[in-house]
């Protein structure tokens, strides 16, 4: 922890930030040789798209139905005396080659004492399960194994685990491809397997563009790192039953990314995210419609200090 006696955005604070980033880069350089040794020991495959990547992507996806699922939430507005929040999940469905698409919503009111993040995750998994038809490719914005839940209370952790396990099991039962996409991963699974503490994406930073690693397996979940643009590799997670046909699945993932605005994030997830977001105007409409039980004097005090009396 780098502690200092001033505001973050101050001469001292900015200097501390610069020093931290400089030290971090130096640390990466020192570990570069080890990283290259690890990279050379991993089986990495190339995707051959030809010169026109978008044309290749359209051909790969022709006839495929892809569904992206993402959610957003409104925290309980405590300062207005509103003891509830809300979760909204959007499922964006597109039939490639036919120009057909639609969006479906699932929403839930969440009480103040409930864990809104866990509720959102469970609703997202439930929405994914409802779309598992054995024909579509499902994309989720996040990982399929919520390991972070182990550090939470037993009740909350079990809620995450149940939702994830049910979704993975249903994917296998219906044989519906189910892909978790993590745009910027800070996992250390590969690194720790080689006895070092470093993010996998940094270790694999020298991967060629349009390449992907062999699948690694952890329990009933597999993962791979993919690099479809000059940015750091992204992480893809999927149920172990998909491993045998992974080369085909990763082509579909790549093609979805080629249709996206950045070439490194699936198109269906871009659209799902844009529809899932609860805008500030929508939050304001809820506040005006519901009204408050009472205003927090602490909140009023903050406003008066921010805007003047």
Image: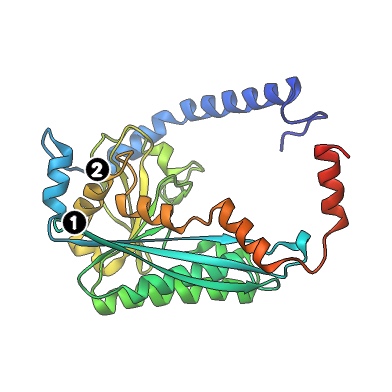
Percent position of residue 207, x then y:
30, 36
- Helix, strand or loop at label 2? It is helix
**Is 106 left, or right, of 168 in this rendering?**
right
Q: Is residue 48 visible?
A: no
| Residue plotted at (38% across, 73% down) | 167
Q: Which residue is mark 1?
A: 99
Instruction: Classify mark 1: residues with Cα within 10 Å, few (<14), some (14-19) or many (20+).
Output: few
| Residue plotted at (42% across, 56% down) | 275
Residue 258, which numbered label?
2
In the rendered view, would you say 21 is above or below 293?
A: above
Query: Quadrant where the N terminus lies?
Result: top right
- Helix, strand or loop at label 1? It is loop
The span from disc 1 to disc 2 (Cα, nearest Å) is 17 Å
| Residue plotted at (21% across, 57% down) | 249
- The part of the image, by quadrant, that contains residue 126 is bottom left
Residue 261, which numbered label?
none
């Amino acid at each position: 922890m780098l502690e200092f006696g001033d505001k973050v955005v101050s001469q001292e604070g900015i200097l501390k930030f610069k020093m931290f980033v400089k030290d971090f880069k130096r640390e990466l350089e020192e570990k570069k040789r080890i990283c290259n040794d690890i990279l050379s020991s991993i089986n990495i495959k190339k995707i051959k798209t030809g010169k026109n990547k978008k044309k290749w992507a359209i051909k790969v996806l022709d006839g495929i139905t892809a569904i992206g699922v993402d959610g957003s939430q409104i925290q309980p507005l405590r300062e207005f005396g509103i003891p509830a929040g809300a979760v909204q999940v959007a499922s964006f469905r597109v039939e490639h080659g036919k120009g057909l698409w639609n969006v479906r919503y699932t929403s839930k009111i969440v009480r103040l004492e409930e864990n809104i993040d866990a509720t959102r995750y469970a609703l997202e998994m439930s929405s994914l399960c409802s779309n598992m038809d054995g024909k579509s490719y499902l994309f989720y914005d996040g990982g399929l194994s919520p390991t972070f839940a182990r550090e939470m209370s037993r009740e909350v952790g079990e809620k995450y685990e149940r939702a994830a396990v049910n979704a993975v099991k249903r994917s296998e039962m219906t044989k519906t491809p189910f892909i978790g996409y993590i745009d910027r991963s800070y996992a250390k699974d590969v690194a720790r397997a080689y006895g070092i503490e470093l993010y996998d994406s940094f270790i694999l930073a020298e991967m060629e563009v349009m390449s992907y690693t062999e699948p690694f397996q952890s329990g009933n979940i597999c993962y791979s790192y993919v690099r479809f643009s000059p940015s750091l590799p992204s992480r893809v997670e999927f149920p172990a039953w998909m491993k045998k046909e992974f080369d085909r699945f990763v082509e579909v993932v790549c093609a979805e990314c080629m249709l996206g605005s950045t070439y490194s994030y699936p198109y269906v997830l871009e659209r799902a995210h844009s529809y899932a977001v609860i805008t500030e105007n929508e939050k304001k409409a809820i506040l005006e419609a519901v009204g408050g039980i009472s205003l927090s004097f602490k909140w009023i005090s903050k406003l008066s200090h921010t805007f003047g009396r």
